[in-house]
Amino acid sequence: MAKSLFFSLILAAAASAAPSAHTRSGVTTMSGSQVSSYTPYAEFSRAAYCSGTDTWNCGAACEALSGFVPYLTGGDGDGTPHFYVGYWPSGDTAVIVHEGTDPTKLLSDLTDEDFLLTDLDPTLFPGLSAIGIQAHNGFHGTQAVTAPAILAAVKQIISERHVSTVTCVGHSLGGAIALLDGMFMRIQLPSSIHVKVVTHGMPRVGNQDLANWVDENITDLAHITNMHDVVPIVPGRGLGFHHPSNEKHILSGDDWVACSGQDNTDPSCIVGAVPNLLAGNVIDHLGPYHGVMMGTLSC
Ligand SMILES: *[C@@H]1O[C@H](CO)[C@@H](O)[C@H](O)[C@H]1NC(C)=O
């Protein structure tokens, strides 16, 4: 009851606010160059949907990231989403990318009552369950399957290419796995290695303690949300799920804002823009992310 009144108030605020005034608290308009700086990561997310990443011959997305050297590819596109790991000379970083899934299927999974918050596997994430951190069981199970092989490939890239940054990227389900990969890399790699995470249309991954841990320990994070995409508002906060800070929200086209705090309810940010499932649009999940569309149809 209280919650729906709260959402109605937000909707009323959204309707009365001037659309182009971005002087609201916690919302900052991004410059054109800031927006463009995220385009390569959208191409990385898009490439994960395309065949040919093993030889870096996956069409337009691979062409946009010329020079990328794949080290490891895998997944079956079913229980284990496709992924690739490689060296990106232009960014001087190792990159890990996971494919997403059909958004309609993802939504039905995430609004199903079968999911639950679960402790992180202590062999992969030593110490984190002791401080109360929990993640969605499906996301964690999926991430855990590929984590050891991915870590080995990243260590090989670090030693052969002398990179000091590891970048985790993904769209949709792939974004949820990327956040967990980022945490995994932060824990498993020396503190001299910088961990960067960029996600597109990421659902909520874990509980408040997980969001707080990410805020403190993965400061180089951008979770990009598009217009009225419904995926980033599930699973709900009422079920104990929370986003980390560092949302970048696309109002439309090149008009992006940086939203401060966790689950910022300003109508210029995803939680305020999509107060409930019916207010969302699943088509916005696919993009465009500064001109880049996601999915197998966009290969
Ligand atoms: C950051 O990571 C360290 C090491 O796991 C942990 O002790 C600390 O509590 C984390 N910060 C937060 C806010 O959880």
Image (tube, rainbow, N blue to C red):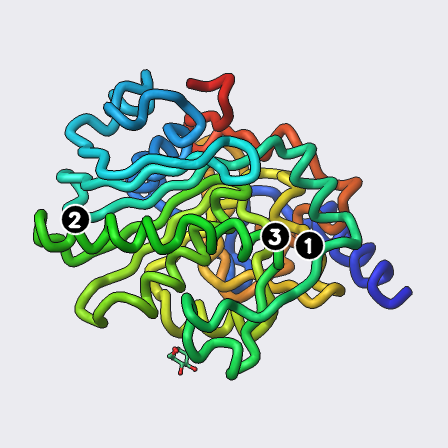
Q: Locate the C terminus and report the quarter of the image it occupies.
A: top left
The numbered mark at residue 138 is: 3
In the figure, is residue 52 to the left or right of 9? Answer: left
Gap in angstroms between the C-alphas marked 1 and 2: 35 Å
Q: Is 40 above or below relative to 246? A: above
Give the residue type at disc 2: Ile
In this view, the residue farthest toward the bottom is 130
Gap in angstroms between the C-alphas marked 1 and 3: 12 Å
- Secondary structure of the residue carrying tag 2 is helix
Dividing the image into four quarters, tell me where ligand 1 lies.
Answer: bottom left
Quickly name the residue at label 2. 157
Q: Is 105 above or below relative to 144? A: above
Residue 111 image point, x, y percent: 75, 48
**How many neighbours does mark 3 have within 10 angstroms: few (below 14), some (14-19), or many (20 or more)?**
some
Q: Does the beta carbon of the residue at mark 2 sit less than 8 Å from ligand 1?
A: no
- Secondary structure of the residue carrying tag 3 is helix
Give the residue type at disc 3: Gly
The numbered mark at residue 235 is: 1
Q: Residue at horizontal 30%, vertical 55%?
A: 151
**How many neighbours does mark 1 have within 10 angstroms: few (below 14), some (14-19), or many (20 or more)?**
many
Residue 255 image point, x, y percent: 46, 38
Q: Nearer the viewer, mark 1 or mark 3?
A: 3
In this view, the residue farthest toward the right is 1
